Structures are given as C-alpha cells and as structure tokens.
Amino acid sequence: MATEDPDKKTEVVLLACGSFNPITNMHLRLFELARDYLHETGKYKVIKGIISPVGDAYKKKGLISANHRVTMAKLATKNSDWVEVDDWESSQSEWLETLKVLRYHHQKLLSPEPTNSLQNAVPLTKPGRKRKQEPNRHDPIKKKNQSPDIKSVPQVKLLCGSDVLESFGIPNLWKLEDITEIVENHGLVCISRVGNSVQKFIYESDILWRHKNNIHLVEEWITNDISSTKIRRALRRGQSIRYLVPDVVQAYIEKNNLYSPESEDRNAGVVLAPLQKYASDSKN
C-alpha cells in the first residue's frame, strides 16, 4: 500500500506572493499549515514552497527595497528543507500580476531549462502562452487529472491568507479574468485568520463559488496575528520584535536600520500599481 499511495497523489508547489515587508514567523507558518492540511487530505504531496516577494514597482506605502526583502526572506528560510525564495518577480522593472508569476512557475516546472535561462517578465509568460495558445490556459490542470503521469507536472497553487482572498472584491485591484484563471487552473490554499468569514465571501462571489472545490480553506487553530504592518509599527516605537520574526531577520533589520518613520512614508500618496493600471484600463 505504501508503494502505491505516492503515485496516486498529486504533487503540489505552494507559491506565496506578497510584500514580505518584512517576512515574519506568520508567513513561515502559512506554509506549514498548508502542507499539513494538503497531506491530511491524502490526495496531495507538497514538494516545494516558494516565497516570491513583490517588486518595488508595486508602489505600496512603506515598501522598502526588494533587495532587502528578498535577503530577509532567504535568511528566514535558510534552514527550511522545502521552502525557498525566488527573486524573479522582485527583479522585474515593472509590477507583475500574480497570475503571471503563477504561470511563470508552472512553465518552469514544464521546462526547467529554457525558462530559467530567460530573465524578462514579458517574454517568459508569452512564449509559454504562444506555444500552446489558449490550451495553456486550461490544459495543464486537465492533463494532470486525466494522465497516468499526474506526478510529472505538479500543480502550482497560490498560498495566501484570507485577506488576499477577500481583496478579490476590491475594485480595480484584480482583473476578473485573472481571478478566474487563478482559481480554475491553479487553485488557492487559503489560511483563514481569526474573525474572517471567508466562506461567506466565497458564497457571495459567483466566480469563487463556481470553483470552490479548487479553493482549500485551512483553519488556523493555533491563531497567529503577527503581521508585517505590526512589526514595522513596533520597530518605529522602538519595541522588541524578538520571537515574532526569525532571529536572523531581526539581526538584519537592526544591522541595516531598515524600518523608520521615513521608510514608512515611502510611496505615500502614490497609487498602488494595480489600481493605477486597471483604473486607467477601465477608463480607456
């Protein structure tokens, strides 16, 4: 039985996108909770976790340089045997939609060599799409379900907190077709934080309800309310953040004097990249 089981399981790569400004113990816990949940279903085998910090072009208020954020994430995961940091998204000069990052990592699993050798955001997503045209939007997931070689191409699922899922409802933050492709082709593993009625949000959204079987809601029984915003605030107040972030991250922040009232004002008054892009799209 033990020899048969692994062959029946779908391999999964968990991808977390976000600011990681800074990375906290809560971010790391999301991966552990998601892996436990997926393994407990008996249907999945999580083979890797990827942290993909957003690029500076996202223009979020208080966002410090991607260089520092990627370095902290790498320090935080250096002792993990399955979670790693990918700096492809953060090294792009323009802000990239989450869907493009998912596609990139899926494409990388399909053809590790060619994808790795390409560094630019646009060519990376487009050749993959051109080669298969529309089928690339739907085939990979279906193939995995029908083919006996389901292990050959792992599913890349978006790992997030319930705040990200609920942000789907914010006008001009996400494109409707992107949300559809994310939940239809990739799937979500959503860790629900305290006091969030995520199921109600899914029920009230036609797209999410249609694909609810591809949205895995993970209850966080040992609650953890750490957030990067709270960490930055504590630092501005001169308070300790020990045991809230990995020690190596705390040391790096102190050494580089990273978070201050000045850094919190970075991008103040600047419109967030997606809002800027989609608001202007809807006007045209």
Image (cartoon, grey):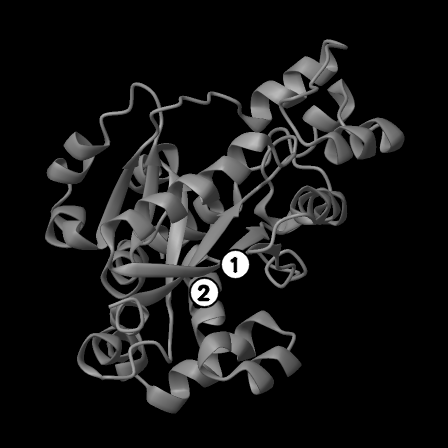
Name the disc covering residue 96, or none: 1
**Looking at this view, is 9 or 23 the one in front?**
9
Left or right, residue 158 beside residue 266: left
Residue at x 40% of width, y 21% of height? 223
- Name the amino acid type tagged 2: Lys
Please state, as top left, top right, bottom left or bottom right, where the C terminus lies in the image. bottom left
Left or right, residue 198 beside residue 263: left
Q: Crowding at label 1, few (<14), some or many (≥20) Cα neighbours within 10 Å?
A: some
- State the SS at label 1: loop
Residue 219 sits above or below residue 4 on the image: above
Residue at x 31% of width, y 50% of height? 38
**Looking at this view, is 232 or 155 the one in front?**
155
Residue 274 seen anywhere in this rendered image of the structure: yes
Please state, as top left, top right, bottom left or bottom right, where the N terminus lies in the image. bottom left
Residue 12 sits above or below residue 260 on the image: below
Residue 172 seen anywhere in this rendered image of the structure: no
Residue at x 74% of width, y 28% of height? 263
Q: CA distance from mark 1 to mark 2?
A: 7 Å
Q: Quadrant of residue 6?
A: bottom left
Residue 244 sits above or below residue 280 on the image: above
**Looking at this view, is 86 or 2 the one in front?**
2
Point out residue 94 in the picture as x, y percentages from the top left corner: 60, 59
Left or right, residue 6 beside residue 259: left
Q: Quadrant of residue 178?
A: bottom left
Left or right, residue 3 beside residue 19: left
- Name the amino acid type tagged 1: Leu
Point out residue 157 in the picture as x, y percentages from the top left corner: 37, 58
Point out residue 30 in the picture as x, y percentages from the top left corner: 45, 39
Can you identify the residue that label 2 sits on? 100
